[in-house]
Image (spheres, helix red, strand yellow):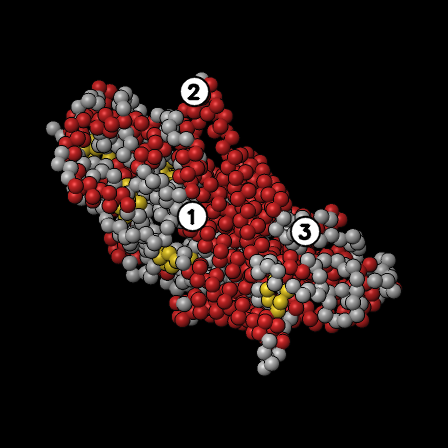
Amino acid sequence: MPRSVRSYCSVDQRDDDGHGDDHNNGHDGYDDEAAYLEQQERRDTVSSTTPTSPMASFRPLHMRPARASDNDLSVSQHGATEHSSLLGHSYHPHSYASMPNTIPGTPRRHNAHIPTSMRMRPSRRGSFSQHLVNALGERESLENSMQASRGSVFQDNRVWYDQFTSTDWVRDSINDAFRVKALRSRKDFRGRVAAWFDGAQGWVLVAIIGILTAMVAYFVNVTENTLFDWKEGYCTTGWHRSKKTCCIGATICDDWLHWSRVVRSDRLDKVQTQYAAFVLGVVLLSMASCILTLATKTVVPSAVSISTLDENLGAEIPSSHDDGGDDDDDDTKRHMTPEARFNETQLRPPMVYYSAAGSGVAEVKVILSGFVLHGYLGVRTLVIKTLGLILSVSSGLSLGKEGPYVHISTAIGNIACRIFTKYSNNDGKRREILSASAASGVAVAFGAPISGVLFSLEEVSYYFPSKTLFRTFFCCIAAALTLKFLNPYGNNKIVLFEVRYLVDWKFFELVAFIFTGAMGGTLGALFIKASRIWARTFRRIPVIKKYPLLEVFLVALLTGLISFWNRYTKLPVAELLFELASPCDTFTDHGDGLCPTRENIPSVLKVLAVAFVVKAGLTVITFGIKVPAGIYVPSMVVGGLAGRMVGHAVQLFALSFADAGLFGHCDPSGPPGSCVVPGVYAMVAAGATMTGVTRLTVTLAVILFELTGSLDHVLPFSLGILVAKWVADAIEPLSIYDLLTDMNAYPFLDNKVRPIFTSELGDITPRSRSERIIDISESALIPASELRVKQQYLHVSGELDGGLAILKHGVLVGLIPHPDLQFALDRLDDEENTLCLMSPLVHWAAGRERSGNAESNADNVDNSDFTPFIDPAPVSLDVHSPMDLVYECFVKLGLRYVCVLRDGKYAGMIHKKTFVKYIKELEKSEMTSHPRSLRFQA
């Protein structure tokens, strides 16, 4: 009789002492060669070019025959491996095997070698200092990892999530509930201290994240200021000092040496020398930033239906989104076998992306929604993006550092989560910390902690409970206070372009503010369209597409050649925005200043118009190149230039017709700024343009308020942002990040707007197939070989985050997820001759409470018991359920799949990705039939 049959003839009377010999027989004859192979297996990692998910296999190689899921590995050169708990680098030293390069693999449990009983019990092993060391690097020994695994108190330790899959929020919440329950069950003094420390971990963690984010921001700000000034010269009193710190505000500074004085050539004019040095500096710094960014190159198998993971609007869209032949292709694919579908995916070109390119805001938004991108928030990406951001911003390209701060701060938060197992072992809890981390990035970027909280709530966060709100606020305050202490700008301020308005606005200016807001929204929407057109034309040229460094070189060269001759295009974007928004204290008689007299306003308008055209064009072609780059401040600068022109035009009009009675108490003989302040229009237009690009509303209004500190001007700012939002939605319904999400085919389910459904759940439910179910009507003992065939069927079908429904006489009695099933099968010693228990009626803890040490328990574990991996109560809905209910289940509960019932019996399963695809198709058909109608309801 097979051992599994003997084991489960009576579950309640299991003999735990009868299987020890079966586990120990394999140790006989354990020679040096096998020990060497096992050691080599433990050292293996996942290749950077094939980010497939790991499968733990700690059992010595001679103890079991090879299985279909075992494959070789290549040595990792990327640094980020997929056995990290979410998105960072590896910090578990276990050996892994990987699926072939063309198929994303399935993760394995990091504590597979630990007996179930030990994984169920809380342990006091593993100190805080050990977790801190583990968070900063690779764990050095298998024993440390075993201690961390024994310290888990989860009722069900889930496997690590697969690459490009969705997290299971419900299961993560259940796991945390069991952890808290076990923690609070201890009533002794040490138990109370442990419970108190567990509650304080979140506060300690967000404080650490805020401080580290501020330190990184300080390093970036100080370094990029010096590198930016190196394009003009250097400081003789200290090469590391910027021009501002070298000259301490002096107009004439002998300590600052220009490159024209260094060269001292009679053949070159002073301006020509400075021009050549400026262009050379822009090109060298930009290319250095691009080379660093290209070091994060990752090639993803062709089976993954995603275009890219960086801000590349020129990426090839998957064939399913092409304009022609969609219906025929969908019908063909719907009737294809999994093997044929898999062969079809091999014909697609692999996806190439650079995790350090762009701002990363769109990807952070998708990650916080539950999508798994391993390595995107790792140490390697953090270091390279920080260094690349310094080089790209200092080069003078039309880009900002505020967007990348969000990515950098989120990466810091992900890495810091490794300190506490409470967050490192639970993706749902970790995302609460990541929401706070993203907010701290905005807090240090704009010096606006309240705006950081609103940004996380409005833009990036998917799940934002009240406790996360308070912790996010605490994180932003910690970041702002740390940055205030570090004083990166030398003016005791945490932001460079802080302005104050002393003159209140007039009532007649409301019309101009509305016009400015509409103009800003139009500019933002047109920027999105222009960026898409540029990317789909120029960026798809074969040479440009193959060599991203060439595109960076051309953009940098053009930027250097054009920007040098205009003062406003030569300035850094932050300083330019500060000058545009600043009020006038003195007025000049020449026509190139921003505070002209009445007679010189037309000449100033000409200079601003040239700067606006140049800056707008450079911003369009710069967005999407392979360097760390943000779009927040560049879009504000473009809007600020246009708004300043509007402000000067209104100022000139009011002074010219002061006697008309429409402009209040405007005195034409007084200073121009006493009637109309053009800087206010620059701020209104800056916020309106950024609204048009990003569709942020409340966050931007508070950012502008925190930058100006003027309660009197909150109304003009808010009015301009409201109008800009309405106008931009009418011209271009998608924000720049929504566009990236759609084009890259992320399985992102928007929780802020809901589609208009007219169908039922049964309309999109695929027919149930025998390969996707496990029937236990006759017996709960299923051959492992049969389960392996079903698991491989799901794998080839690409349903890595799916599962197999367990039926009894057609009634759904449980479900085993695909990753758990594959892990359970890989543990078997003799897969061909093993029967596996699949009954969900057996209590989860039945037969698993053992006494003794870990070594004896490891011998007594019966791996053919699949009961611990079965979900006995999967979420189910009837086929006649309205789609609005299905939408709420996926959005509010964060499910990965929903089982479908018909008359109480199992009828199929709907995955989250399938539901998202259905929504995209519904949106596309709605836009085709009603191109001018709104696609979503609020």
Q: Which amino acid does label 3 sit on?
A: Asn
Q: Mark 1 points at which residue?
A: 378
Q: Could you tell which of marks 3 and 2 lies nearer the N-terminus?
A: 2
Quarter residue 37 falls in:
top left
Quarter residue 509 falls in:
bottom right
Marks 3 and 1 sit apart, C-alpha to C-alpha, by 34 Å
Q: Residue 455 or 250: which is nearer the viewer? A: 250
* Residue 563 drawn at (x, y percent): 60, 70
* Residue 179 drawn at (x, y percent): 41, 28
Between circles 3 and 2, the one closer to the viewer is 3
Question: Mark number for residue 186?
Answer: 2
Q: Is mark 3 on a helix, strand or loop?
A: loop
Determine if residue 443 is in view.
Answer: yes
User: Which quadrant does the N terminus fall into?
Assistant: top left
Question: Furthest-top residue in view?
Answer: 188
Task: Give the left or right position of residue 843, taking residue 419 as reference.
Answer: left
Vertical order, 586 against 882 (above or below): below
Q: Name the residue under label 3.
A: 491
